[in-house]
Amino acid sequence: DASDIEKGTYPHYMLKEIDEQPLVIRNIISKYQKENGEIKLDEDIRKAMQAADRIYIIAAGTSYHAGLVGKQLIESIAKKPVETHIASEFLYNMPLVSEKPLFIFISQSGETADSRGVLVNVKKLGYPALTITNVPGSTLSREADFTLHTYAGPEIAVASTKAYTAQMAVLAILAVDTAKARGLTLDFDPIKELSIVGTVMETLCDQKEALEKIAREYLSVTRNCFFIGRASDYYVGLEGALKLKEISYIQAEGFAGGELKHGTIALIEEGTPVIALATQKHVNLSIRGNVKEVAARGANPCIISLEGLNADNDAFVLPKVHDYLTPLVAVIPLQLISYYAALHRGCDVDKPRNLAKSVTVE
Ligand code: G6P
């Protein structure tokens, strides 16, 4: 309950929750690690992951965006096929499912009606279900066979921040555990890489002034803003656009870099802000090509890149983390830029108009 959770010295819950992310990552590491350093996970969940021939991730809103990253994590680390679906679409347009599916529901609140609708159908069909949630006693947790807790602590601001990074961290742990249980060898130490993420998040949370300046420079007067990225940067761009539109009411859309020329580029005018993410080596040249295309049409590009892939004039450079985990850190500047954009525009950051923290009706 919001009244029980103090903001302390923070002007808004959202800012407090953004700052809590390094702590949440450390908390997740300690909850999912055994004393000998191995991953601690319910044996039944491990078995369910092994038994599945395909995983279906179902979620809404920000949790859906975490699910897109989750697909990439599980496919690249554990080599299991994954599909991520919007709950409300899956409900009315269910795809043909594989013979031995495992359904993973991602939900901060565990109460989203659209996700619950899918869970009810899935259980009727006799399929196993795992819920990844921040509220273990919630409906989606009780009605699924298994639950993984995201340990983010209560999230009060309507715009989700720490719950999103916590969901991705738990998905990364699940992917690593599944890979190990399958006998795959990993070329990285997952716990060490997640700890680095925590440390980098802290560095990013200390860069509020620089990010406030970016918000002021790019977003004070504009009526729209585009986010572009490729591969996992595309998924993070979708989340960045959602954050910005939710709390600042700037019309914001996230696009796959390659799709620009198929429509969106028509919207570029003199001064249109385009926030481009460049944290992925294999697409760095392509995304920078996209930036040139929009800049040539008058856009005001704001490049957020990763150390080692950065170029002159990038607006913000993220410290290096493992390739698979870049979404967990790349979203932080986007959360803070959105926060400051909303603040500068006089919006109610914690309680944006027309939105609910948890949507329990269809
Ligand atoms: C609402 C919230 C979003 C959230 C979505 C899904 O729309 O405003 O922040 O991402 O519901 O909620 P869930 O609790 O299922 O993650």
Image: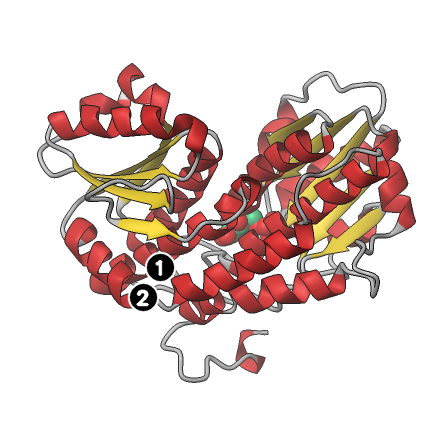
Looking at the image, residue 163 lies above or below residue 17: above
Q: Which mark is residue 208?
A: 2
Q: What kind of residue is marked 1?
A: Leu
Q: Label 1 CB, ligand 1: below 8 Å?
A: no
Q: Is mark 2 within 8 Å of ligand 1?
A: no
Name the residue carrying label 1.
336
**Residue placed at 81% from the left, 40% from the top?**
180
* Residue 53 x, y percent position in the rendering: 81, 24
Return the residue nearer the eye: 98 or 110: 98
Identify the image quadrant of the N terminus.
bottom right
Rendering coords of residue 20 (x, y %): 51, 69
Q: Tell me the kind of residue under disc 2.
A: Lys
Q: Quadrant of residue 284?
A: top left
Q: Nearer the viewer, residue 348 or 216?
A: 216
Q: Is residue 311 left or right of residue 335?
A: left
* Residue 101, visible in the rendered structure: yes
Quarter of the image with the C terminus is top right
In the picture, the disc for residue 141 is none
Q: Secondary structure at mark 2?
A: helix
Q: Is residue 124 left or right of residue 25?
A: right
Give the x, y percent position of residue 281.
43, 32
Whether residue 358 is visible, yes or no, is no
**Position above or below: 24 against 333:** below
Residue 56 position by quadrant: top right
- Closer to the chain start, of discs 2 and 1, is 2
Q: Position of residue 153 (x, y in %)?
A: 62, 68
Circles 2 and 1: CB atoms closer than 8 Å: yes
